[in-house]
Amino acid sequence: MAFVTLAGAIAPATAATEPPARFLQPVFAGEVGPLAFDDCPAGRACLWTGDNATGTRWDAPSCGDFKFDSRYNNNIESARNRGGGSVILYDGSQFNYRIREIYNNSLPIELTEAQDNRATTVTVLC
Ligand SMILES: [Ca+2]
Ligand SMILES: [Ca+2]
């Protein structure tokens, strides 16, 4: 719904044959669709760079240990874990300085101000 409104608002009236503006944007893995907690796919753990499921979404590609790239490093602020096990966020690059465990209970999670924009590595449990 939000995308329809956005595309309609910014598309020039004379460019009816051009694709919607959103298709002109680069698409990265894990950066898909409207931004909301409900957009986290079943079976996945999702993290967002903004509060309240806004910004760019990172979907855990599998169980395991991951180091965030520059788009996500020190940038995670909200989460929803629909995966098979907990997700553990760490401030350090060596899976150290644990910030928070996010249980796989599917609840919308807002990191606290002290936890915001600090995660550098993440362990995704099965
Ligand atoms: Ca952020
Ligand atoms: Ca960090």
Image (tube, rainbow, N blue to C red):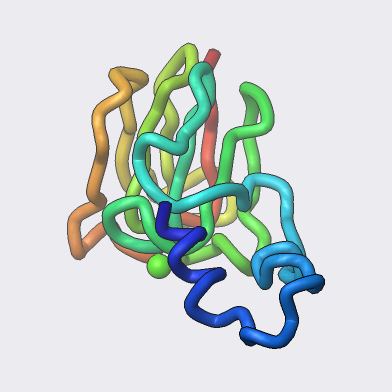
Q: Is residue 48 above or below residue 107?
A: below
Q: Is residue 68 above or below residue 125?
A: below
| 112 on left or right of 45 | left
| 79 on left or right of 67 | left
Q: Name the residue at 31% across, 41% down.
A: 100
Closer to the camera in the image, 115 or 29: 29
Q: Name the residue at 62% across, 54% down.
A: 68
Q: In this view, does 21 lie above or below 43?
A: below
Q: Name the residue at 55% across, 81% down.
A: 10
| 59 on left or right of 85 | right
Please state the horizontal and vertical placement of residue 125, each as a whole percent of the image: 52, 20
Residue sitting farthest toward the right = 17
Please state the horizontal and vertical placement of residue 51, each as a whole percent of the image: 29, 59
Q: In this view, does 116 lie above or below 62?
A: below
Closer to the camera in the image, 51 or 68: 51
In the rendered image, the quadrant that contains the C terminus is top right
Please state the horizontal and vertical placement of residue 25, each as a whole percent of the image: 72, 70
Q: How many labels does the image show?
A: 0
Please state the horizontal and vertical placement of residue 64, each as a whole percent of the image: 64, 27
Q: Name the residue at 47% across, 46% down.
A: 96
